[in-house]
Amino acid sequence: MNLTALEQERYARHLLLPEVGLEGQARLRRGRVLVVGAGGLGSPCALYLAAAGVGRLGLMDADEVDLTNLQRQLLHATGDVGRAKVTSAAETLAALNPEVAVQTYPQRLTAANAAAILAEYDFVCDATDNFASKFLIADACHVAQKPYSHAGILRFEGQTLTVLPGQSACYRCVFGGPPPGPVPEAARGLLGVLPGVIGTIQATEALKYLLGIGELLTDTLLVYDALKMTFRRVGVKRDPACGLCGAGAGGVD
Ligand SMILES: [Zn+2]
């Protein structure tokens, strides 16, 4: 507990919620969330987590800000073009909420560094934009038994799923393995606001997990269609033959 007077003022709208209150806000302050990717999904996700008072945020991204990013990546501004994304993002988050400790990782998550980094966090948000990273995060979170929020976005459609390793359907249960080739350039268009919707849902899942409230988006793939303005819930199940979490996978559960 022991929120300072300034914290009580900043989080006043949280404290009015019985489901959060002083105890919940203190839980958020103790919370540690790793956001992998400081781009379209990572921007709203990290901004809302910082605003909410999550005490420690990890931000991982090896890229620099490019002019084409600014159509959707709200952590960065025009003057940040050419700077490291994690540096630009950390400054934006510090300006929003200086109470939050932001740890930056200007690198990619790899099989070699994942265990040591994931050990520092309670929840992981996969805000990456490529299949190789998504499968690596799923695999590393399974090994480390860290809950994570998966998300993917393309054109006008987004999808997201929350995974409690060993308890709910994992990314590989649902998608198997990476597709054979990269996504063609022509199919990589993206309505700029789309990651805003999906990244915000990822932040919501992280906050619910830290607070221990509500129902997580487990065993359910949420599919958002911006053109039709529909959210579809697709039930998914753990696959006993899953190469990662299945009975024969030699996993940890
Ligand atoms: Zn699985």
Image: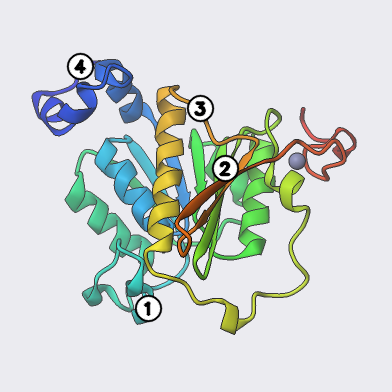
Residue type beneath disc 2: Ala
Disc 3, ligand 1: is the CB inside 8 Å?
no
Mark earlier in primary sequence (3, 2): 2
Residue 215's disc number? 3
- The answer to whether 59 is drawn above or below residue 207 in the figure is below
Residue type beneath disc 4: Asn
Q: Name the one closer to the observer, 227 or 10.
A: 227
- Residue sitting at x 28%, y 24%: 25
- Residue sitting at x 47%, y 29%: 209
Mark 3 or 1: in front is: 3
Crowd tier of the residue under label 3, counting other residues whose Cα lies within 10 Å: few below 14, some 14–19, many 20 or above: few
Residue at the outermost right position:
248
The answer to which image quadrant residue 15 occupies is top left
Residue type beneath disc 1: Asp
Quadrant of the rendering where the N terminus is positioned: top left
Q: Write down the residue under mark 1.
A: 66
Crowd tier of the residue under label 4, counting other residues whose Cα lies within 10 Å: few below 14, some 14–19, many 20 or above: few
Whether pointer 4 and pointer 2 mark residues with C-beta atoms closer than 8 Å, the reply is: no
- Residue sitting at x 37%, y 64%: 193
Residue type beneath disc 3: Glu
* 69 displayed left or right of 253: left
The answer to which image quadrant residue 69 occupies is bottom left
Residue 40: x percent and y percent? 41, 63
Q: Is residue 112 visible to the viewer in this orientation of the structure? A: no
Mark 4 or 3: in front is: 3
* Ligand 1: quadrant of the figure: top right
At mark 4, the secondary structure is: loop
Q: Write down the residue under mark 4.
A: 2
Q: For the residues marked 3 and 1, what is the alpha-carbon distance in whole angstroms? A: 37 Å
